[in-house]
Amino acid sequence: MNENLRIRDIGEQGLLQRLHHFCPSDLVGDDAALLPVAAGHSVVVTTDTLVDGVHFSDRTTSSFDVGCDRPPLTSQI
Protein backbone atom coordinates (compact mmCIF):
# COMPACT_ATOMS: atom_id res chain seq x y z
CA MET A 1 0.00 0.00 0.00
CA ASN A 2 1.23 3.48 -0.83
CA GLU A 3 2.13 5.24 2.44
CA ASN A 4 1.80 8.64 0.77
CA LEU A 5 -1.77 8.03 -0.39
CA ARG A 6 -4.26 10.53 1.03
CA ILE A 7 -8.03 10.49 1.24
CA ARG A 8 -8.15 13.45 -1.13
CA ASP A 9 -6.36 11.23 -3.69
CA ILE A 10 -8.91 8.39 -3.56
CA GLY A 11 -12.03 10.26 -2.44
CA GLU A 12 -14.75 9.20 -0.04
CA GLN A 13 -15.88 6.21 -2.12
CA GLY A 14 -12.30 4.98 -2.52
CA LEU A 15 -11.84 5.13 1.24
CA LEU A 16 -15.07 3.22 1.81
CA GLN A 17 -13.96 0.51 -0.62
CA ARG A 18 -10.75 0.10 1.35
CA LEU A 19 -12.60 -0.09 4.67
CA HIS A 20 -14.80 -2.89 3.34
CA HIS A 21 -11.70 -5.13 3.30
CA PHE A 22 -11.55 -4.97 7.11
CA CYS A 23 -15.16 -5.61 8.10
CA PRO A 24 -18.44 -6.92 6.70
CA SER A 25 -19.75 -4.61 3.98
CA ASP A 26 -23.10 -4.11 5.74
CA LEU A 27 -21.30 -2.40 8.64
CA VAL A 28 -19.76 0.46 6.66
CA GLY A 29 -21.63 3.24 4.90
CA ASP A 30 -20.87 6.77 3.84
CA ASP A 31 -22.52 8.38 6.86
CA ALA A 32 -22.26 5.90 9.70
CA ALA A 33 -21.06 2.50 10.83
CA LEU A 34 -23.06 0.00 12.88
CA LEU A 35 -20.81 -1.74 15.42
CA PRO A 36 -21.93 -4.70 17.53
CA VAL A 37 -21.02 -4.11 21.20
CA ALA A 38 -22.85 -6.96 22.96
CA ALA A 39 -25.28 -9.72 22.07
CA GLY A 40 -28.34 -8.02 20.57
CA HIS A 41 -26.88 -4.52 20.97
CA SER A 42 -25.14 -2.24 18.50
CA VAL A 43 -23.84 1.30 18.49
CA VAL A 44 -24.01 3.68 15.53
CA VAL A 45 -20.84 5.71 14.99
CA THR A 46 -20.92 8.71 12.71
CA THR A 47 -18.85 11.75 11.94
CA ASP A 48 -19.17 14.71 9.64
CA THR A 49 -17.04 17.66 8.68
CA LEU A 50 -18.10 21.26 8.27
CA VAL A 51 -15.60 23.40 6.42
CA ASP A 52 -15.49 27.18 6.71
CA GLY A 53 -15.98 28.73 3.30
CA VAL A 54 -17.58 25.55 1.94
CA HIS A 55 -20.48 24.71 4.25
CA PHE A 56 -20.70 28.00 6.16
CA SER A 57 -18.89 31.31 6.60
CA ASP A 58 -17.37 32.34 9.91
CA ARG A 59 -18.13 35.91 8.90
CA THR A 60 -21.87 35.33 9.04
CA THR A 61 -22.26 32.22 11.21
CA SER A 62 -21.31 31.79 14.85
CA SER A 63 -19.66 28.58 16.07
CA PHE A 64 -22.84 27.87 18.08
CA ASP A 65 -25.01 28.15 14.98
CA VAL A 66 -22.72 25.85 13.00
CA GLY A 67 -23.12 23.11 15.59
CA CYS A 68 -26.72 23.64 16.64
CA ASP A 69 -28.21 21.20 14.09
CA ARG A 70 -25.98 18.33 15.23
CA PRO A 71 -27.69 15.52 17.14
CA PRO A 72 -26.72 14.89 20.75
CA LEU A 73 -23.55 12.87 21.28
CA THR A 74 -25.53 9.89 22.50
CA SER A 75 -29.05 8.75 21.96
CA GLN A 76 -30.88 5.53 22.63
CA ILE A 77 -32.64 3.83 19.73
Image: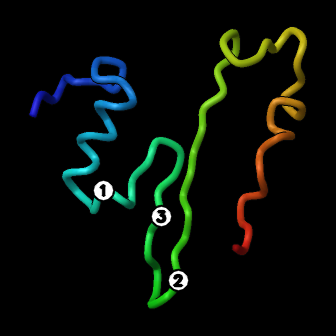
The C terminus: image quadrant: bottom right
Q: Is residue 7 above or below residue 76?
A: above
The image quadrant that residue 44 belongs to is bottom right
Residue position for label 3: 34
The circle on residue 41 is: 2
Sooner in the amino-acid sequence: mark 3 or mark 2: 3
CA separation in Å, label 3 and label 2: 10 Å
Q: Position of residue 30 (x, y in %)?
A: 46, 41
Q: Label 2: few (<14), some or many (≥20) within 10 Å?
A: few
What amino acid is found at the position of numbered circle 2 in the picture?
His
Q: Is residue 8 above or below residue 47?
A: above
Q: Is residue 20 above or below residue 5?
A: below
Q: Position of residue 11 (x, y in %)?
A: 35, 24
- For image coordinates 76% across by 17% down, the residue present is 56
CA separation in Å, label 3 and label 1: 11 Å
- For image coordinates 28% across by 23% down, the residue present is 10
Residue position for label 1: 25
Could you say whether the residue bearing mark 3 is in a helix, strand or loop?
Answer: strand
Sooner in the amino-acid sequence: mark 1 or mark 2: 1
Q: Is residue 51 above or below residue 66?
A: above
Q: Label 3: few (<14), some or many (≥20) within 10 Å?
A: some
**In this image, 33 relative to 48: left or right?**
left
Say how many tags the image has. Answer: 3
Looking at the image, is mark 3 or mark 1 nearer the viewer? 1
**In this image, 50 relative to 34: left or right?**
right
